[in-house]
Amino acid sequence: MDILQSIIRVDLDQLPFLLITILIAFTVHEFSHAYFANKFGDPTARLLGRMTLNPAVHFDFFGILLLLVAGFGWARPVPVNRDNFSRPRLMGVIVSAAGPISNLLLGIIGALIYGVLAATGVLESISNDRVLEAVYLFFGTFIQWNFFLFLFNLIPLPPLDGYRIVEDIAPRSVRGKLQQFEQWAVFIFLLILFIPGLRTYTIDPLGHWASEMSRTFVQLFLRMFGS
């Protein structure tokens, strides 16, 4: 167990809850891309069977493994053909934003459910300490990781959704320069992830902001339901 813990960045006690959270978060994220792309006239993802909430369809083993080992990962990206949109740039922005926004909503829903359970006394009624600890761990992991994924995916570097949003919003002259920069931007993204000094000032603050968002929404719903 000590060897496994030295490899994986997540505490082993939290690992099952993280895996459940990631499967839900990644699945809803990719489904959201596929759903809005299909709604706007691009059936590519639907025809490939990607417009589904079946986690197995979106699962990428290496992406999940890397998330556990390196602290970041991915699901299988949903293919989108913007040429099928009647308004490619506007609809492209919506399709790209749908993924991160879905994680934001999942985080809020998680905080809402936690607030209801706490306010109605359901949590207090759990007499088994191990079960109660598991419930706390799950909600803490689910809420914070979805907020983190919301923030992380808005980073304006490829291959993240934030880059696609910037690309669609930018004027045509700027978009050409962005495409030339794209191949180098991927390396910049990897450097940010793997060099501790850069990560400290770029990725790590997202975890702090996600924690603050988690705390804010949980407290909001606790006050709302009178707990």
Image: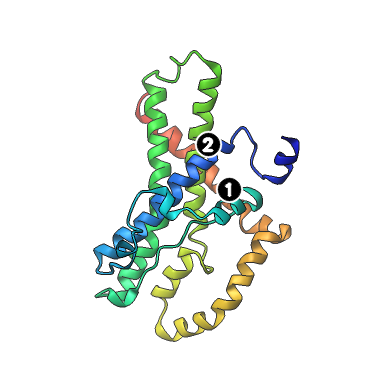
Residue 219 is at least partly visible in this image: yes
Please state which of the two labelled residues, at mark 2 or mark 1, is closer to the viewer.
2
Q: Position of residue 53 (x, y in %)?
A: 35, 49
- Mark 1: amino acid: Gly
In this picture, is 116 found above or below 26?
above
User: What amino acid does circle 2 point to?
Assistant: Phe
Which residue sits at x=35%, y=70%? 92
Residue 115 left/right relative to 130: left
Q: Position of residue 25 (x, y in %)?
A: 44, 47
Rendering coords of residue 150 (x, y %): 46, 53
In the rendered image, the quadrant that contains the C terminus is: top left
Q: Identify the mark at residue 17; answer none if there is no mark.
A: 2
Task: Say whether residue 138 is left or right of residue 47.
Answer: right
Q: Is residue 74 left or right of residue 58?
A: right
Image coordinates of residue 32 in percent, x first then y, are: 35, 56
In the image, what residue occupies the spot 59% across and 38% down?
Answer: 15
| Circles 2 and 1 in contact, beta carbons < 8 Å | no
Q: Tell me how far mark 2 sits from mark 1, CA to CA.
A: 17 Å
Q: Earlier in the sequence, mark 2 or mark 1?
A: 2
Residue 42: quarter of image? bottom left
Q: Which residue is mark 1?
A: 207
